Amino acid sequence: MVSQKTIDIVKSTAPVLKKNGQQITTRMYEIMFHNHPEIKEQFDMSAQANGSQPAKLASAVYSYATQIDNLPALTSMVEKIAHRHVDTHVLPEQYPIVGESLLQAIKDVLGEAATEEVMAAWTEAYQALSEVFINREDNIYRDELATQTP
């Protein structure tokens, strides 16, 4: 799925993500909502305001960083998030928006620590994870359609 080099780099960033994760995800939402205000309606803005949504995302990103080489350990998290995405009508074409915003937030918060190598690894890692979600959400959408069809 991802290269060993990417796995090693992403795992090495886990301590930084644990320390700065919520700052990164808060910044990510700022960037995303500024550049794409049309997607705000898919979010619970009270969860943005009280910090619970950025905290949940920071925890998920940290979990991914620590388990990137053991995706089965993330199955329950992926299931919960994928179902939430289906409930809020997240579409595959929105993943690049999130990815672009997340990567920019990592650069903004980590500054010089966000080297080209780190950013390339996180770009690859995000792409792989987005494919996991897109595929799982597609299956959920299909299952829902199948149960609605007489």
Image: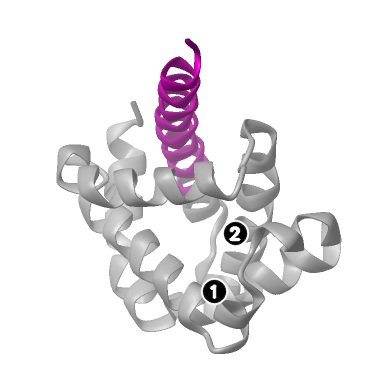
Question: Compared with residue 143, is residue 89 higher up or lower down, i.e. above or below?
Answer: below
Q: Which mark is residue 64?
A: none
Query: Which residue bears the numbered disc 1?
Result: 24
Relative image position of residue 90 (x, y in whole percent): 61, 43
- Residue 133: say if magenta: yes
Where residue 101 sits, quadrant-wise, is bottom right
Q: Is residue 21 left or right of residue 49?
A: left
Question: Compared with residue 48, is residue 100 higher up or lower down, i.e. above or below?
Answer: above
Relative image position of residue 138 (x, y in whole percent): 49, 25
- Lower sequence index among marks 2 and 1: 1
Q: Is residue 121 left or right of residue 95?
A: left
- Residue 124: say if magenta: yes
Residue 110 in view of the camera:
no
Which residue reaches farthest top? Answer: 150
Dominant SS of magenta comes to helix
Question: Compared with residue 123, is residue 64 higher up or lower down, i.e. above or below?
Answer: below
Task: Identify the amino acid type marked 2.
Answer: Leu
Q: Which mark is residue 102?
A: 2
Residues drawn in magenta: 122-150
Image point (22%, 42%), residue name: 75
Relative image position of residue 88 (x, y in whole percent): 59, 50
Viewer-side residue, 143 vs 85: 143
Image point (23%, 57%), residue name: 66
Residue 64 in view of the camera:
yes
Task: Identify the amino acid type marked 1.
Answer: Ile
Do the residues under discs 2 and 1 have CB atoms within 8 angstroms? yes
Viewer-side residue, 63 vs 138: 138
Image point (34%, 26%), residue name: 1
Q: Secondary structure at mark 2?
A: helix
Question: Compared with residue 47, is residue 13 higher up or lower down, i.e. above or below?
Answer: above
